[in-house]
Amino acid sequence: MKREEETRAKAPIGRPRGFDADEALERAMRVFWKKGYEGAGLSDLTEAMGITRTSMYAAFGNKEALFSKALERYTAGPASYAARAVREPTARAVAEGFLAGAVGLTTSPASPAGCLGVQGALATGEPGRPAREALAAWREDGVSLLHDRFRQASATGDLPPTADPATLARYLMTVANGIAVQAVGGVGREALEEVTRLALGAWPSA
């Protein structure tokens, strides 16, 4: 009995029995993905996570910190197609993989429509400024990832001398962001795949 009392005394206050931090974070990520940073209220988040506000603050910090952790999870999980795409052997295959990943993610029936990194905080008031800036930096990180890969392709002759790696990276990110916006508006996968084929028609050949 004494040992049980000591165990209960050491347990974090407000954390429910069986609390799964990974599962709670996954659910929070989906709330942010569906409703955006400002649209996701604390009640929405805690209800989806199955915990109290006290537990949320104890495990993840405030809403801004929770959003940051959710974005990290999104990058390593649903949005990991970008990291996989840049490992393709040719620049053309990188572009194809990146856009195919964008279409697959934003139109998946198993997930909220669109992209957390695009619509999560495009337009926010002052309280949402940190999230808006975090997502702007996140999208720029994606551009940098593509840029670095295309510079390698240029150096090995996989891209023609006239192709600018920075412009190509920005081009792909712009198309992918547009795909996300269209998906939120209800445009289906087949139509967006047609868009990617058209976009890749302008891809430079070595």
Image (tube, rainbow, N blue to C red):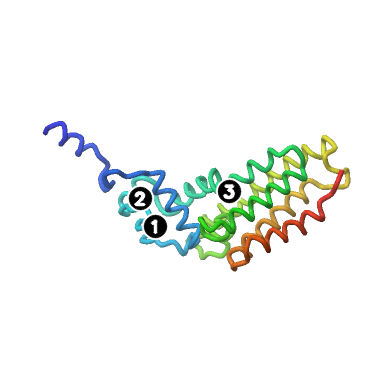
**Which of disc 3 and disc 2 is earlier in sequence?**
2
**Residue 3 occupies quadrant:** top left
Left or right relative to 28: residue 79: right
Residue reaching furthest to the left: 1
Q: Which mark is residue 45?
A: 1
Amino acid on which the number 1 mark rests in the picture: Leu
Name which of mark 3 and mark 1 comes first in the sequence. Answer: 1
Q: Is residue 9 left or right of residue 50?
A: left
User: Which secondary structure, mark 2?
Assistant: helix
Mark 3 closeness class: few <14, some 14–19, many ≥20 residues within 10 Å = many
Q: Which mark is residue 79?
A: 3
Q: Quadrant of residue 80?
A: top right
Q: Residue at x 49, y 61 (%)?
A: 34
- Amino acid type at image mark 3: Ala
Left or right of residue 102, residue 74 in this image = left
Q: CA distance from mark 2 to mark 3?
A: 24 Å
Q: Which residue is mark 2?
A: 56
Q: Position of residue 141 (x, y in %)?
A: 64, 46
Q: Are marks 1 and 2 in contact (CB under 8 Å)?
A: yes
